[in-house]
Image (cartoon, rainbow, N blue to C red):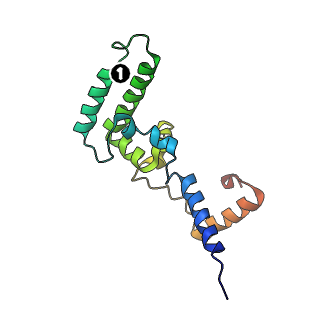
Amino acid sequence: MRKSGAPLILLLLLFQLQTSQAGWIYSSNENKNSPYNILGLSRKSTSRDIKKAYRKLSLLHHPDRNPGDTTATETFARLVTAHDILSDSTKREIYDRLGHAGLERLKDEDPTVEKDYVPPDDGLTFLDRFIQRIFSSIFGNTDWDDL
């Protein structure tokens, strides 16, 4: 009797969908707008490499050297943003882990972005959380603190 490979393929597709939604697999647009690609660097670049690439490209695309050229102005703005991300060790570490979504969460002052974040202990056990999830999936999201 021949076994079908359909369940395995379905499982792999589901995993691919979950990881891409979680931000583990960056889209091509994410790679194109990556600070590393904007500055023409690899992820292993040192701060000295970042500074050198930024200076070289910013001189080339500076709006004062290219008056009236809107693409140079846009490119220069992207260079400044990329340099801002990569020159700050905290922002760079968050970008390397979470991409642009992590930087947005950092802007919104989300404490869970930090690497050493420890969630507050609310006194709930595993069973309490499991029961909350079941009721939330049935009745929708409910603020359980008000009950």
Place of residue 133 in the rendered image (x, y in percent of width and height, measured from the top left): 67, 63
Question: Who's the residue at 35% across and 12% down the image?
Answer: 64
| Side of 129 relative to 63 (left or right) | right
Dot 1 falls on a residue whose secondary structure is: helix
Tell me the quarter of the image containing the C terminus. bottom right
Q: Which residue is labeled 1 in the image?
A: 61
Task: Specify the quadrant of the image occupied by residue 140.
Answer: bottom right
| Side of 76 relative to 125 (left or right) | left
Place of residue 25 in the rendered image (x, y in percent of width and height, measured from the top left): 50, 53
Give above or below for 60 relative to 102.
above
| Side of 135 relative to 96 (left or right) | right
Give above or below for 45 relative to 80.
below
Question: Who's the residue at 49% across and 42% down the image?
Answer: 30
Place of residue 50 in the rendered image (x, y in percent of width and height, measured from the top left): 28, 36
Residue 105 appears anywhere in the view = no
Q: Residues within 10 Å of mark 1 (few under 14, many from 20)?
A: some
Q: Closest to the observer: 123 or 101?
A: 101
Mark 1 residue type: His
Question: Who's the residue at 60% across and 73% down the image?
Answer: 8
Q: Closest to the observer: 59 or 144?
A: 59
